[in-house]
Image (spheres, rainbow, N blue to C red):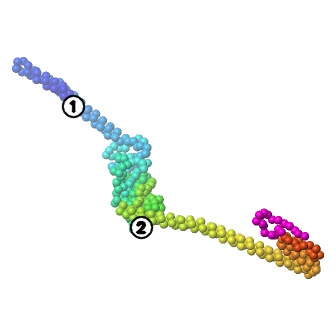
């Protein structure tokens, strides 16, 4: 329309300048009026069209999509309205309603006592100590350097967004306070050695209790000790103490091993001696009882037939004596008078030459 208006003005100038300086024809005001009205109509319709497009775009800004790991928290003029689940949804456009979509399945991580960079490799520059968080006092008034991490996730998105203003700082401060409480109730030896697992569990329980009291909507999934050691200024002294304790434990274990080796042997010998003594006692008792019974029976027989019993006892005694006396020869008195004396050659010492026993009997 601006181009038509320019053409109309140019035409009027040409008409006014023609005729050798005389007065030109009068302009066509009806045509001018018609064109001006069409221009106003076009401008009004364009504004309405632009306004409609802007309204549609404003309404379209209310559509949003919640990812599978998220939930939608809708606010109306800043106040909580509703929770929406994963999928496409619509809310009244800004500034009436707005939506936040926190991830409720992501496990978040807070570092206490140190910081690591997420954008660099694992080098010395990516690790930074924070002594004001890590140095803690134990129950026996020793200082220990504790570095640990806390893993957590969102349990209630509404409480997480509206009840705490700085979730990360809240978790970090509560975790540090819980760890200081637990370390303060334990001795340094227990913290450095056998009680690390118990310290983690107790800190996790105390931290969760603190966050629940805030209605934070956070659930703690793990508390893990990364490094626990004495301060650098006294670490050498602690190493000496630890070495002495190891030597003490080694000597105690050696002594216990020696004791466990000697005591069973001694008990075995005692049991063996007692068993042998018991067997000897039992045998002697039974032997004495047998001899006593035999003597009583013999005495009974002797009272009944004295001559026969006396002769039998004599013969049995002589038999026993002669059996134990070795080689022998029995001669009557008459035979002894007619033979030469008996020389037992086999009883003579062995000769140096032969080396064999010889037997001879001279009559």
With respect to residue 162, does 5 lie above or below?
A: above
Which circle marks residue 316 in the picture?
none
Indicate whether residue 227 is drawn in magenta. Answer: no
Tell me where residue 14 appears, x and y as whole percent.
Answer: 11, 21
Inspect this view and state whether residue 192 appears.
yes
In magenta segment, residue 355? yes
- Residue 275 vs 159, above or below: the answer is below
The quarter of the picture where residue 318 lies is bottom right
Left or right placement of residue 117 versus residue 283 in this view: left
- Residue 178 seen by the camera: no
Residue nearest the observer in this picture, 315 or 6: 315
Residue positioned most to the right: 334
Q: Report which residue position mark 1 lands on.
A: 40
Residue at x-position 8% and y-position 19%: 18
Q: Can you say whether 175 is above or below 271 in the image?
A: above
State the residue at coordinates (34%, 54%): 128
- Residue 61 pos. (x, y %): 34, 40
Q: Which mark is residue 139?
A: 2
Q: Residue 45: x percent and y percent?
A: 26, 32
Q: How many marks overall?
A: 2
Residue at position x 91%, y 79% from top? 310
Magenta residues (range): 345-363
Quadrant of the image containing the N terminus = top left
Of residues 89 and 223, the one nearer the viewer is 223
Residue at 25%, 32% in the rendered image:
46
């Amino acid at each position: 329309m601006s181009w038509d208006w320019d053409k109309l003005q140019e035409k009027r100038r040409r008409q006014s300048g023609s005729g050798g300086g005389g007065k030109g024809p009068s302009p066509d005001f009806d045509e001018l009026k018609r064109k001006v009205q069409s221009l106003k109509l076009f401008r009004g319709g364009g504004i309405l069209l632009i306004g409609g497009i802007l309204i549609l775009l404003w309404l379209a800004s209310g559509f949003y999509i919640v990812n599978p790991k998220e939930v939608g928290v809708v606010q109306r003029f800043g106040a909580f309205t509703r929770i929406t689940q994963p999928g496409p949804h619509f809310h009244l456009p800004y500034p009436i309603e707005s939506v936040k979509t926190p991830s409720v399945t992501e496990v978040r991580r807070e570092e206490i006592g140190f910081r690591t960079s997420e954008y660099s490799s694992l080098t010395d520059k990516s690790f930074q100590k924070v002594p004001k968080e890590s140095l803690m006092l134990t129950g026996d008034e020793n200082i220990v350097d504790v570095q640990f991490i806390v893993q957590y996730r969102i349990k209630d998105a509404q409480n997480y967004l509206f009840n705490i203003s700085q979730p990360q700082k809240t978790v970090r401060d509560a975790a540090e306070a819980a760890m200081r409480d637990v370390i303060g109730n334990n001795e340094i030896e227990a913290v450095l050695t056998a009680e690390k697992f118990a310290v983690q569990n107790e800190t996790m329980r105390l931290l969760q209790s603190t966050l629940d009291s805030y209605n934070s909507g956070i659930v703690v999934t793990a508390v893990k000790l990364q490094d626990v050691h004495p301060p650098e200024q006294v670490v050498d002294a602690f190493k000496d103490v630890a070495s002495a304790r190891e030597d003490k434990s080694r000597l105690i274990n050696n002594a216990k091993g020696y004791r466990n080796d000697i005591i069973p042997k001694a008990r075995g010998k005692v049991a063996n001696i007692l068993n042998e003594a018991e067997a000897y006692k039992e045998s002697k008792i039974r032997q004495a009882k047998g001899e006593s019974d035999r003597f009583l029976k013999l005495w009974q027989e002797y009272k009944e037939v004295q001559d026969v019993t006396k002769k039998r006892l004599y013969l049995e005694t002589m038999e026993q004596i002669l059996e134990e006396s070795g080689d022998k020869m029995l001669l009557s008195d008459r035979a002894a008078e007619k033979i030469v004396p008996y020389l037992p050659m086999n009883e003579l010492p062995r000769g140096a030459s032969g080396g064999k026993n010889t037997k001879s009997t001279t009559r």
